[in-house]
Image (cartoon, grey):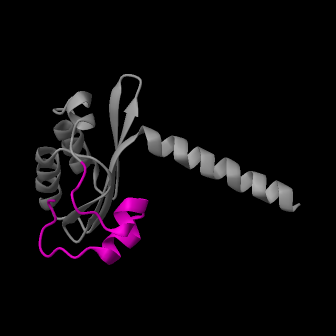
Amino acid sequence: MVVFALLAVAVLVAYLLVQRTRELFCVSVRKGRALVVRGRIPQGLLNDLTDVLAKPPVQSASIRAVRTASGARLTVDGVDEGQEQRLRNVFHIYPLARLSAAPLLDRRSLGQWLGIAWLAWLLDRSVGPRNP
């Protein structure tokens, strides 16, 4: 029984690692502030996404970009359909090469190093709108 449980955990961890290798970035939004949790995102794209999320203000959302065979796909949770479409429109202005070439954040918290949103927010020391 223990061997089966360990095998299941190993398969789950392997699956998550494979999924994370395809992920370009993950941005968490709380109370109108955006925080890059994982990956790299061009500053211009982050600014544009933040502008879309400001009107109407979003309390909590998650935005992920994943590399696909045909380019990149944006997955959004926590916003209405209109804002989701506006986010996708902004996202598709940026080609995959530009997304992949974006620099990593200079100063990342432990939560951002580990890619855990709640820990990244807990350790976030910035004040005001978050645009690293």
Q: Nearer the viewer, residue 131 or 60?
A: 131
Numbered circles on residues, count: 0
The quadrant holding residue 107 is: bottom left
Q: Residue at x 77, y 57 (%)?
A: 6
Q: Nearer the viewer, residue 62 or 79?
A: 62
The quadrant holding residue 9 is: bottom right
- Residue 106 magenta-highlighted: yes
- Residue 60 magenta-highlighted: no
Quarter of the image where the C terminus is located: bottom left
Q: Position of residue 72 (x, y in %)?
A: 33, 32
Q: Residue at x 43, y 61 (%)?
A: 114
Give the answer, above or below, for where 17 lies relative to 94: below
Give the answer, above or below, for where 7 lies relative to 113: above
Q: Position of residue 11 (x, y in %)?
A: 68, 47
Q: Residue at x 53, y 46 (%)?
A: 17
Residue stretch in magenta: 104-132
Give the answer, above or below, for where 15 lies relative to 116: above
Which residue reaches farthest top? 70
Q: Position of residue 99 (x, y in %)?
A: 24, 36
Quarter of the image where the N terminus is located: bottom right
Residue 15 as seen in the image, left or right of residue 104: right
Residue 119 as seen in the image, left or right of residue 86: right
Give the answer, above or below, for where 76 lies relative to 95: below
Residue 76 as seen in the image, left or right of residue 52: right
